[in-house]
Amino acid sequence: MPNESASMNKPENWKGQKKAGKDKCSLEQACNAPLCPLDTHIESTTWYPDEPVCTSRKFTGLIWKKNQRKLAKRTPNHSRYLTLKILNRNYRIKTGIEGLNPDSLYATEQRREQNWTSKHQPKKPLSQEEKRVFLNRMKRS
């Protein structure tokens, strides 16, 4: 069940406008996900961890959809929201991670996003040597 404070912050037409034609989603009538890959205004949409995630198999590989599923499991405070810019990053999602505070008066959303991203650095790619060491360690276990 969505959080009351979360649903109060959403505009009435929170789904935005979908593209028509070939890109029309077959799940559109039954889908309640606020972030839809076909939404033309997706950049301005916010997502709360207790809200549904797009279930279309057509868009399974999107990093922000994978992150939504992980965050829904690991976020203790469902009253904090995340933006597409935050969801679209490749970072480590650990238990206790939180989104942006919607009641914060001290900064604009852009500044809050910058502050959040500076605290949650992206995963660094492993070198071939680091991968080899890791695989050897796993073989010993």
Image (cartoon, grey):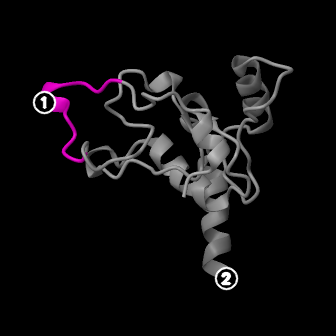
**Label 1: element kind:** helix
What separation in Å lies between label 2 and label 1 (alpha carbons)? 50 Å
Mark 2 closeness class: few <14, some 14–19, many ≥20 residues within 10 Å: few
Residue projecting furthest to the left: 21
* Rendering coords of residue 103 (x, y %): 78, 31
Residue projecting furthest to the right: 106
Q: Quadrant of residue 99?
A: top right
Q: Is residue 123 visible?
A: no
**Label 2: element kind:** loop
Of badges 2 and 1, the one in the foreground is 1
- Residue at the (45%, 30%) spot, across then down: 14
Q: Residue at label 1? A: 22
* Rendering coords of residue 55 (x, y %): 34, 52
- Direction from residue 123 to residue 38 in the image, left or right: left
Q: Quadrant of residue 59?
A: top left
Mark 1 closeness class: few <14, some 14–19, many ≥20 residues within 10 Å: few
Residue 21 shown in magenta: yes
- Residue at the (67%, 49%) spot, across then down: 92
Q: Amino acid at mark 2?
A: Ser
Q: Quadrant of the C terminus?
A: bottom right
- Direction from residue 68 to residue 6 in the image, left or right: right
* Rendering coords of residue 88 (x, y %): 53, 35
Q: Nearer the viewer, residue 97 or 31?
A: 31
Q: Amino acid at mark 1?
A: Lys
Magenta stretch: give its range: 17-27
- Residue at the (54%, 58%) spot, across then down: 1
Q: Quadrant of residue 10?
A: top right
Which badge, 2 or 1, comes first in the chain's sequence? 1
- Direction from residue 104 to residue 67 in the image, left or right: left
Question: Looking at the magenta stretch, what is its main secondary structure?
Answer: loop
Q: Is residue 45 above or below residue 51?
A: above
Q: Residue at label 2? A: 141
